[in-house]
Image (tube, rainbow, N blue to C red):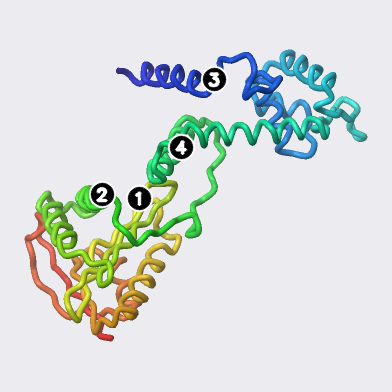
Amino acid sequence: MSVTQQIRSFNRFYTNFLGLLNRNILDSPLSLSESRILYELAQQETLPANQLVETLQMDKGYLSRILRKFEKAQYIQKATSADDKRVQYIRLSPKGQALFHYLNSQSEQQIDEYTRHLPEADKARLAALLAEAEQLLNKSDVTPPPVTLEDITIRTHLNAGDLGFVVMTHGELYQKEYNFGLVFENYVASGMLEFCEQYNPERSRVWVCEHLGKRVGFLLLMDRGEAAQLRYFFIDAAYRGIGLGKKLMQLYMNFLQEKGYRSSYLWTAHELATAASLYRRYGFKLVEEKPSQSFGKALIEHKYELVL
């Protein structure tokens, strides 16, 4: 199926799914277009009529007819600008506000009903996919607000797909950024298998970072007796520079001390200078260097250690 066919197929599915072809929306007296205008009017206390035309990309004559209908039904109130008699401001009347709140509530109930069968992880994934689709299709020059640390959720339990995510992401990231070979992906897969086979949440921990249901970062602490190994520290390139790395390292240090570990260590490569700088900031020291061909290229492996 081509891209065009897939989009048209989804359009047909979605209009039927939400009942958008019905004459009235959500058991209200409004059509789809009329409910969309009501929504825009509810977003601001007053709104110039010409701004509605620009926002909705709607025919001016068609919009005027709907606004006359709204005025007759007492959903809106109009006022002429004191500065420019040609400018007319529109706002929702108490009756219009009541209708908006009813429609808004009905719409949320409808979505809740349609997604009730989905696990929470699938709901978050659906929201992320829809947000991505909106971003891809949005042709405006408006830049979306930057992601902040507060937008990221961090969970400390494993879900289905987490292990595969770590293996795939490390394979793709390190091939792209450092030209590591396929052997590195195999190395990560072996390490994740070892971790999974001996995983005890009382002594080991994962930190899985998510944004709108999408995994964007990862770190794990692996029990090695009196020592703990730091492994598979990853942050998606789009989420670097917001303090997420420092946040993960602090969570790692807190758990390390809480469980009474005597030391911690990690292995990295000499090319990963930014990560090494972060490790040193938390007290890790370089204790060993060795030439290696283990990851499909010549490099120097570095061992960092922290003694508590």
Mark-to-mark CA distance, 2 and 4: 26 Å
Left or right of residue 213: residue 37: right
Looking at marks 1 and 2 on the same chain, the residue that comes earlier in the sequence is marked by 2
Q: Quadrant of residue 27?
A: top right
Q: Residue at x 37, y 20 (%)?
A: 6
Q: Nearer the viewer, mark 2 or mark 3?
A: 3
Instruction: Name the residue that disc number 3 marks.
Output: 19
| Residue 293 visible at all | yes
The disc placed on residue 236 is none
Q: Closer to us: mark 1 or mark 3? A: 3
Kind of residue sitting beneath label 4: Arg
Label placed on residue 215: 1
Q: Nearer the viewer, residue 193 or 188?
A: 193
Relative height, residue 239 to residue 135 (above, below): below
Q: Residue drawn 25% across and 69% down?
A: 204
Instruction: Give, as a three-letter code, the residue at label 1.
Output: Arg
- Depth order, front residue of 12/246: 12
Q: Amino acid at mark 3?
A: Gly
Of mark 3 and mark 4, the one earlier in the sequence is: 3
Which is nearer the N-term, disc 2 or disc 3?
3
Question: Dot 4, how many residues are within 10 Å of its Cα: few (below 14), some (14-19), or many (20+)?
Answer: few
**Rendered residue at 30%/77% (across/down):** 256
Q: 26 or 186: which is nearer to us?
A: 26
